[in-house]
Image (cartoon, coloured by chain):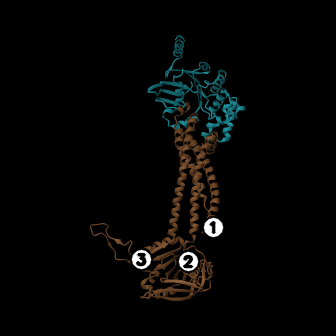
Chain colours: A brown, B cyan
Amino acid sequence: MKFRDLLRLVINNLNRRKARVALTAIGVVIGTAAVVILVSLAIGLQMNATEQLYGIGDLSQIYVMPSYGGEGSFVGPIGGGGGGGEIASPDILLLTNSAVDDLRGISGVKSVIPREYLMSSMFMQFRKTMGYSGVYGVGTSDLADLGLETQQGTTQLSRATVVIGYMVAQNFSDPNLRPGQEPPPPPELYDQQVQLIISKWDSEGNEIRRNFSVRVAGVLSESGSEADWSVYMPLEQVKAMNEWAMGTRINYNKTGYNEVIVKVENADRTLEVRDQILAMGFQANTMLDFVQGINNFYKILQVVLGGVGAIALLVAAIGIANTMAMSILERTREIGLMKAVGATNRDVLTIFLGEAAGIGFIGGVGGVLTGWLAGQALNVVAVAYLAQQAAEQGGMPPSVAVYTPLWLPVFVLLFSIFIGMVSGLYPALRAATMIPVLALKYE
Amino acid sequence: MTSSLIQIAGLKKHYQMGGTTVRALDGVDLEIPAHTLTVVMGPSGSGKSSLLYLLGGLDRPTAGEITVSGERLDQMDENALALFRRKTMGFIFQSFNLVPSMSALENVAFPMQFAGIATARRNEKSKQLLEQVGLADRSHHTPSELSGGQQQRVAVARALVNDPSLILADEPTGNLDSQSGIAVMQLLSDLHRSGRTVLVVTHDPRMTRFATHKIFLLDGRVVSEAEYQSAALDAMQVSHGG
C-alpha cells in the first residue's frame, strides 16, 4: 500500500466520524496543552532565576581556601575490632606563595589573586557621616582582573586610594542625628578624601585607634554580589593594617593566604580546574556549583510539571484506545472485506495505527497551539504582575515568566502522535488478526 | 476436456458451538473445472457458505486439501493467502459489503490500493468496470444513494478490478428482488462467458438455469441431484404434513 493512499484513507476514515474524533482529540488537546504550559512555565521560571542570578558573581572564578585537614581524613576501619578509627595526622595545606605558583601552573588558569580581609574593627568617616564596610586587600593592582567594573573613576589600586562598591555610600549615616530629623542623603564619595579608622585594644582594655586618610579613586558598578558592599585596597596595605591590629609580622610564606581567587580563562573549564584544585588538597568553591544546583532544581521542576501534564495525556490515551476499539467493532465487516479483497494483516494494522496516530496528531496540533497561546497570555499577565511587585518591593523585574522553546512544541507533537499509536496498538492488532470469515459474518 | 481449477480432497470443517461440535463440512471431495459457472445448492446449514469461504482462503479447514490454480491454500500462511486472494479471487457477498463513506467509483477502486496501483490507473479501470455493469452514471453516488441491485452490481465491478481468474459469490441475489437478482445472475453469466470461472453459492433453485455445473450439499456432504431433490421433497412434506 502506498503512503499517499494510506494517508488519504486515514483522513477519509477520520472524517467519517468527526464528532467522535473531535471529542477524543480534545482529550489529547488538554493533555498536550497542559504539558506545553507547565513545561514552559518551568523553563520560564528557570530563565528568570538565571537572570536574577546573573550578578551573583563571575562563573569563571574559583574561591580557594587552605585545607586544615579534618573532614575527609578519617582513616582506618570504621567500627572494626574495638579500636575504631584513628584520626590521621592533620594534613594542613596552606596557601603559601609556592602554592599560589602551583595554582598558576594549572592549565586553563588565567590569573591567581590572593585576597585578604581586614581583621580589625573598622569604620569610615566622611565629614559628619560614618559608614561600615568589609575591607579587602587584593593581590593585584587592577580590580578588572577580578571582573569588576567601575561606574566612576578607575579600577586601579594604589597606596592611599580605595575603590568602593556600589552600595558602600548607602551605609553612611550621621551618628549625631537628632530624633525626628531628616537623615541626609548618602554622600557622594567619589574623589573624596575618607578617613578609615581601625582600632584595637591593649591588655588593659583601652581602645587604640589608627587613622588612614584615603581617596576614593573609583566606585564600582552594581554587580549584585558582595563587591557592592566592599572596600578594595592593595594587599600590602591591608597586610600592614592587620599586622598593626594583631601586633605580629605576617609572613604569607609561613601562614599562607586566607583566600585565593583563581580566575579561569573560560567558564566552561571552571569545574575542571576546580576539580584539579580539590585534588591538590585545597578547598575550592565556585558559584557555578550553586548555579548548577539551581539548574538541576529547575530540571526536576520541568520533569515534575511535565509529568502532571503527562497524566492528562495518559487519560487522553485511554480515550484514543476506547475510540479505536469502538471503531473497530463497528467496522468489523469492513475489516473482513479489506482482507477479502487482498489486504494483508500488516495493511489493516497500518490503517488503524494511522487512524490512532491521526487522532494524536490532531489533538497534538490543537494542544500545542492552545498551550502556546495560553502561555503567551499568561506571560503578559505574569510579567506585568511581577514587574509591579518588583517596583513595590525592590529587586529586578523579570522579563519572562513563561517561555516555550522551539523544541517543546515539536517534541510534544511527535509525542502525541506516538501516544496515539501506542494506545491504538492493541485495537489495531486485534483488527489485523481477525479471522476474515468471522469478521465478514459479524453482525 | 477442461483442466480443474479447484481440487478439494477430504475437506472437513468442524467448529464448536455451545459445547457441541458442528460438522459444517464433513469430508468433501470435489473438482471444479476452469471456465465454468458452478452453482452450489444447499439449504441453510448445509455447509455451502463454509465451502465458499474455505475456497476463498478466508477460513481454515479442520482437515483436507484445497488446491486452487495448483496452489495448496491449506498450507499457506495468512500473508500468502492475502496476496493470493488479491491476485486470484474476486468476492461478491449477499450483503454487498460496500464501504458506506466511499462513492461507487471509490468502492470499486478500493482493492487496487492494496495492490499499490497508481491513482490514475485505478480510476480509469474502475470507470470502465462501472460502465460494464451499467452504472457509469452512478459512479459518484454513495451506497446509500443506490438501490440494492445497483449496490450488488458495484460489488460485482469491485470483484473484477484485480482481474481474478476465480469469482466467488455468496448468495449474491439473497438480498435482491427477483428482477435485480436475475440481472445480477445475468452479469455473472456474462463473466463466465468471457472466460472466467464463477462459483455461486445459493439456495435459490432459479439460479441453476445459468449454471454449467451444479453441486448439491446436504449436511456437510456432496450429494447427487436426485438425493437432493428427494430430501427437499421430504422436507416439504414434513412442513406441510405437520
Q: Which mark is residue A229?
A: 2
Kindly identify which residue carries mark 3: A67
Q: Which residue is drawn at 39% across and 75% down?
A: A69
Residue B57 visible in the shown view: no
Horizontally, is B96 left or right of B29 in the view? right
The residue carrying pointer 3 sits among few (fewer than 14), some (14 to 19) or many (20 or more) residues within 10 Å by Cα, namely some
Front-most of residues B38 and A368: A368
Front-most of residues B152 and A266: A266
Q: In whole angstroms, how far apart are the C-alphas of marks 2 and 1?
A: 22 Å
Q: Of tags 2 and 1, which is closer to the observer?
A: 1
Q: Residue at x 56, y 88 (%)?
A: A213
Q: Of tags 2 and 3, which is closer to the observer?
A: 2
Label 2 marks a residue whose chain is A
Q: What residue type is labelled 1?
A: Ala
Front-most of residues A351 and A310: A310
Q: In which quarter of the image is the N terminus of chain B?
A: top right
Asked if residue A33 is positioned above or below residue A148 in the image, the reply reads above
Q: Which numbered disc flags the more N-terminal residue, 2 or 3?
A: 3
Residue B147, position as x, y percentages in the image:
67, 27
Front-most of residues B25 and A410: A410
